[in-house]
Image (spheres, rainbow, N blue to C red):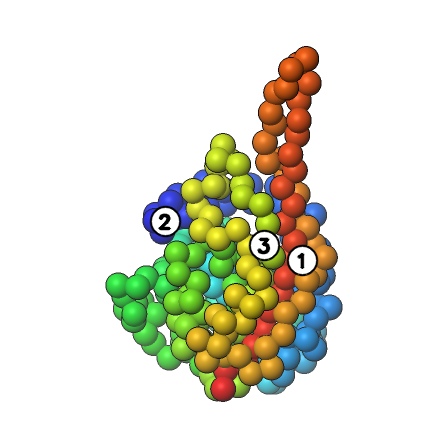
Amino acid sequence: MSSEQNKAYFNNEAASYDSKHEKTLNQLMEELRSRLDFIGVDWAEEDHDDLETSARRPVRLLDYACGTGLVSRSLAPYTTQCVGVDLSENMVAAYNARAENQGLLKDEMHAYQGNLCDPSDPSPAAFTSPDFFNFDIAAVGLGFHHFDDPALAARRLAERLRTGGVLLILDFLPHDKMHTAHPATDTVTKHGFSEDEIKQLYETAGAAEGFALQSVGVVFSRINKTTGTEGGTETVTTLKRTVFIARGTKG
């Protein structure tokens, strides 16, 4: 699976992504915010207008495969800096536009175009500065099923955590395959993950302390395929994908 296929698909989706998935994205934001204790980061005090950012305990988030910023927007009130990275320059532009529209400064929420998981490039030049290391939390929201090598992705993200930092993954539990006619089919490398598979990713990444996984009850549903039958009736198959949240701490 080519990173270029993912990049092209999400470049095309960026402009309409939030409006197309608004209801589900809002549900996921609520689920994330209701699980702050489960995630287990020593969060900054919730941001208020009368509380200067400089007075808050620093808590830094790396939001990889950030898209338009689902995870960043969910956790921004409890962090002091959100750094997004995405293959798609259009998704990065959408992320940054939303941050600017919220009145956030670049050092509070900003995304960059890039690939942290290229097996041929273990240390991308654009991401070698200290600004891209020692995060308190590294998160991927609905991105792991697009990765060529999920184990490599988990390791690369854990490398950018401080000791005691949290690796957070939102993705799908095992589900049926997508119909080949769907435009996203060529970008999907894994049809969901079992708890054992995810735990193994955390273990190989060195971030399995306190590992836990919860199904959040949010389900993505879409028509998977429609087939004709004798008599002119149609059979409609619905693809349902249930979201989980997993967390583990870097030892």
The answer to which of 150 and 130 lies nearer the viewer is 150
Inspect the image, locate mark 2, and give the three-letter code of the amino acid beneath it. Met
Q: Residue furthest front?
A: 230
The dot on residue 1 is 2
Q: Earlier in the sequence, mark 3 or mark 1?
A: 1
Residue placed under numbered mark 1 in the picture: 28
Query: Which residue is at 65% across, 53% downward?
Result: 242
Q: In the image, is 62 to the left or to the right of 114? A: right
Q: Earlier in the sequence, mark 3 or mark 2?
A: 2
The mark closer to the camera, 3 or 1, is 3
Crowd tier of the residue under label 3, counting other residues whose Cα lies within 10 Å: few below 14, some 14–19, many 20 or above: some
Inspect the image, locate mark 1, and give the three-letter code of the amino acid beneath it. Leu
**Label 3, label 2: how many angstroms apart (C-alpha)?**
19 Å
Query: Which residue is at 52% across, 66% downward?
Result: 197
Q: Are marks 3 and 2 in contact (CB under 8 Å)?
A: no
Q: Mark 3: which secondary structure? A: loop
Crowd tier of the residue under label 2, counting other residues whose Cα lies within 10 Å: few below 14, some 14–19, many 20 or above: few
Location of residue 195 in the rendering, given as x and y in whole percent from the top left corner: 59, 66
Q: Earlier in the sequence, mark 2 or mark 1?
A: 2
Query: Which residue is at 68% across, 75% downward?
Result: 38
Residue placed under numbered mark 3 in the picture: 174
Task: Work out whether 46 lies above or below 223.
Answer: below
Location of residue 144 in the rendering, given as x and y in whole percent from the top left corner: 49, 59
The answer to which of 175 and 37 lies nearer the viewer is 175
Dividing the picture into quadrants, the one containing residue 192 is bottom right
